[in-house]
Image: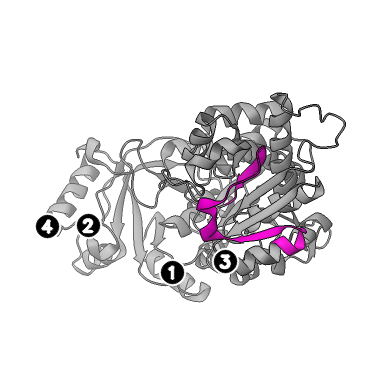
Amino acid sequence: MDREKRSLIVHVVSQFKFNWSILSFKLGYMQKPKWEGGQYEGDENERLDTLRLARELGADYVDLELKVVSDLMEEHQPIRHRDCKLIVSCFIDGMTPSNEDLVQLVGQMQSTGADIIKLVSNSSSITELSGFFYLLSHCQIPLIAYSIGDRGLISQLLGPKFGSILVYGSVEGNPVPGLPTLYSLRQAYGVEYINAETKVFGLISKPVSHSKGHLLHNPTFRYVGYNGIYVPMFVDDLKEFFSVYSSPDFAGFSVGFPYKEAVTDFCDEVQPLAQSIGAVNTIIRRHSDGKLIGYNTDCEASITAIEDAIKVRGCTNGEASLSSPLTGKMFVVVGAGGAGRALAFGAKIRRARVVIFDIDFDRAKSLALAVSGEAQPFEDLVNFQPQKGAILANATTLGMHPNTDRIPVAKATLGDYKLVFDAVYTPRMTTLLKDAEAAGAIVVSGVEMFFRQAVGQFKLFTGEEAPREFMREIILANF
């Protein structure tokens, strides 16, 4: 078998549930056929001959589809070979079956004499994965169960917590759609440290591919010895999500685009600042009663990042007596969503004069009314002439990867701003910030806001003070 052509690397753990240690082994594996959710379209007999050869050459495991094993059994052909163990797999096309149907399917697969059972799906919703978690927790035979795609990612990452004995990851430089890389499994997520007691945290967002939160929170959990994992959660329906994942295992969440406002309806309590803002970016499941408590760490994170940048540059112009260098300044916010609301309320608290632009003018007017500010039509932004020394804060996704060449304002006006802040942090230095810096403005990246809000989240997640210097080193290395 040509091992350079293998599209997956597989890691096996010890047979003791939850006692993970990563080891390598020889696996007889070829691409799955189209009818089993794979990409192989070649001759089926040739594919099976290759797997037989792998078995004869000493593969520790051979992965065969349930249909193939059933056909071989009917034809009374040998399935096993000496010490080679059998993985019987099944691809579930369409919606994941009920728990009862999954149990029946496992029983059918177990009757083949499989040493390990593998179930793979392509779930259309993150909530469908709960059936796999249930199965992993109750199955008496070694089991692998996961879903591919963005919505299925947590099934792979949380497999060790619920009892999966194998984790699949793609080889660096040879990505497989829907699978995390081997590097990310070990370095970013630390799957070998996950056990039944691991607390689950994650980003609720749509999409989640831009997120880098796992690169920061997971190493920090390990650094302080906290048994937690932080994962991206591609959520389509908030109500369904919170209904399905209501156990204490799911201990807290970050909230991203587009849910920071809508998620307040699913919190049992919302802290006063977040209530005033009308947006939540952090949720904690309270230990004592399981209630969801909403917080906002974006507000102070963004505003203090802006204030500190002005102070570091010594651009207060003799205003040291004021409580904030933002007091009395025009503060232009582009975007009236969750991040925009946090910025606008932070600016209001600092007694800045807030001007709001949003593509939804009614939304802009509503936020302007809440912060005693002014709303302007979004189409006027390109010709808007700010007061000299104003602050500009972009709270939209304009400029985010992959559409990195877009900016929300006219380039010619950037020189009139004292400082330009961009909530976008992928890329770290957006086109807006590059143009603003070239025009002479102080610039503040969304990475700084991300760092500061993450520090606040870490304390809420763990109850401990965040190791700020360690976290900043990770930010500098990965963002």
Task: Answer with mark 2 or mark 1, whichever residue precedes in sequence.
Answer: 2
| Distance from Cα at disc 4 to Cα at disc 1 | 30 Å
| Distance from Cα at disc 1 to Cα at disc 3 | 54 Å
Q: Which residue is mark 4?
A: 43
Q: Which residue is mark 3?
A: 360
Q: Magenta includes 389? A: yes
- Viewer-side label of 2, 4: 4
| Distance from Cα at disc 2 to Cα at disc 4 | 20 Å
Visible residue check, residue 246: no
Q: Callout 1, which amino acid?
A: Gly
Task: Answer with mark 2 or mark 4, whichever residue precedes in sequence.
Answer: 4
Indicate the position of residue 197 as horizontal and vertical percent values. 67, 48
Where residue 217 sits, quadrant-wise, is top right
Going by the image, does 8 lie left or right of 135? left
Chain part drawn in magenta: 368-395
Q: Residue at x 51, y 75 (%)?
A: 100
Q: Residue at x 81, y 57 (%)?
A: 271
Q: Callout 2, which amino acid?
A: Pro
Q: Is residue 190 above or below residue 273?
A: above
